């Protein structure tokens, strides 16, 4: 199975992504590394454990990482995810512990211990932990198999400012470092995640699984939907982060372009913008596979099918 580390700030959509990974025997989930993002670190580290306990996967270690972006004050998204970051169903407080080791040290040690090119990083939140690990241990950069992340936007521009997507906006310096690291990089931006929309039948399919997981996922997405419905008038909620795991499982559901993507860190107006050379109008070297499209029906069919295994 392919070894992955999920770096995350749960988040209802992070939760669904984590469950999808846990439901997939092709993936070997080495650990969950938490970062401040949708809500502060104490809550993301708590939410990650709530998710593990929901499916009795207390064997998956949960690490707490960076509690603030590299050079800026933390911006959170309670307006989207609720006060806890995981509003929706009422789930018990976790009993399993957070690991004592810092998430950044876990990432460094894991990459050093595994054969080079065998560990994939899956960032679902701001890139603070990943950039900090690369900065502290430059020797691990070449050992990463691939980074497959949710972040950025091009045609869909922004969801936290007119120009920027949340994960990149929260820690643009970290994003800049990760995009410049030279690691094989796959980017799932809003352009694709806004096509992976929940609809009533899709949410009903989760609920109709008739399991605690199906019920929780239906309630999470139900909560998450209200923001996008009110804000964008969209039909449902974009399942951003599960696109990362779905890409690992079934890349043929997705299509994109191998292009240059640079991160804006200077301008206040466009801070955190992913400047994607979609039309290749510069000669800047391509550094990312920037995904633009998804077979949404195929994505939801797979997701529902997998969640049924839990
Ligand atoms: C991203 O920001 C968070 O709110 C979601 O969990 C997702 O990772 C979407 O912009
Ligand atoms: Ca997230």
Image (spheres, rainbow, N blue to C red):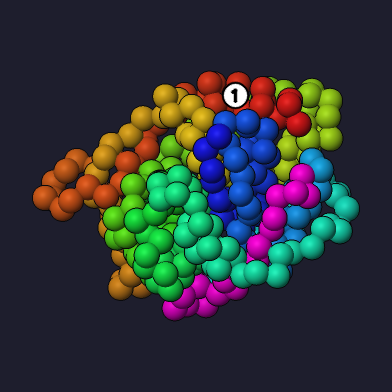
Q: What residue is rendered at 63% in x and 31% in y? A: 25
Please say whether residue 43 is visible from this viewpoint.
no
Check the picture and name the quadrant holding the C terminus.
top right
Compare residues 83 and 294 and report the one nearer the observer: 294
Q: How many marks?
A: 1
Residue bearing mark 1: 302
Q: Which image quadrant for residue 236?
A: top right
Compare residues 89 and 106 and report the one nearer the observer: 106
Compare residues 271 and 3 and report the one nearer the observer: 3
Element carrying mark 1: helix
Q: In the rendering, at what x and y percent does residue 298 appear? A: 53, 21
Q: Which image quadrant for residue 202?
A: top right
Q: What residue is rendered at 11% in x and 50% in y? A: 283
Give left or right: position of 229 versus 109: right
Q: In the rendering, at what x and y percent does residue 89 appear? A: 82, 46
Q: Which residues are magenta?
A: 57-73
Please say whether residue 262 is visible from this viewpoint.
yes
Give left or right: position of 5 versus 283: right
**Magenta stretch: includes residue 96:** no
Q: In the rendering, at what x and y percent does residue 86 appear? A: 73, 53
């Amino acid at each position: 199975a392919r070894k992955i580390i999920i770096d995350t700030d749960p988040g209802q959509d992070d939760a669904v992504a984590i469950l999808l990974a846990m439901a997939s025997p092709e993936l070997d989930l080495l650990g969950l590394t938490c970062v401040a993002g949708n809500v502060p670190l104490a809550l993301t580290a708590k939410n990650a454990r709530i998710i593990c306990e929901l499916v009795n996967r207390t064997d998956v270690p949960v690490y707490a990482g960076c509690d603030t972006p590299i050079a800026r004050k933390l911006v959170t998204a309670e307006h989207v995810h609720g006060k806890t970051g995981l509003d929706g169903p009422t789930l018990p407080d976790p009993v399993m512990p957070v690991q004592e080791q810092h998430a950044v040290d876990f990432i460094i040690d894991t990459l050093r211990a595994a054969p080079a090119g065998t560990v994939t990083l899956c960032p679902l939140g701001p890139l603070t932990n990943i950039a900090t690990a690369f900065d502290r241990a430059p020797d691990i950069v070449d050992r990463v198999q691939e980074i497959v992340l949710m972040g950025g936007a091009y045609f869909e521009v922004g969801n936290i400012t007119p120009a920027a997507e949340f994960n990149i906006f929260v820690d643009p310096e970290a994003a800049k470092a990760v995009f410049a690291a030279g690691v094989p990089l796959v980017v799932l931006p809003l352009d694709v995640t806004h096509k992976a929309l929940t609809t009533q039948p899709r949410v009903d399919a989760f609920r109709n699984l008739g399991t605690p997981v199906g019920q929780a996922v239906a309630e999470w997405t139900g909560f998450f939907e209200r923001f996008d419905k009110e804000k964008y008038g969209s039909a449902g909620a974009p399942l951003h982060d599960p696109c990362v795991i779905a890409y690992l499982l079934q890349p043929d559901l997705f299509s994109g372009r191998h292009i240059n993507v640079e991160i804006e860190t200077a301008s206040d107006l466009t801070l955190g913008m992913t400047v994607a050379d979609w039309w290749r109008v510069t000669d800047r070297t391509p550094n990312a596979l920037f995904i633009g499209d998804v077979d949404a029906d195929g994505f939801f069919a797979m997701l529902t099918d997998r969640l049924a295994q839990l």
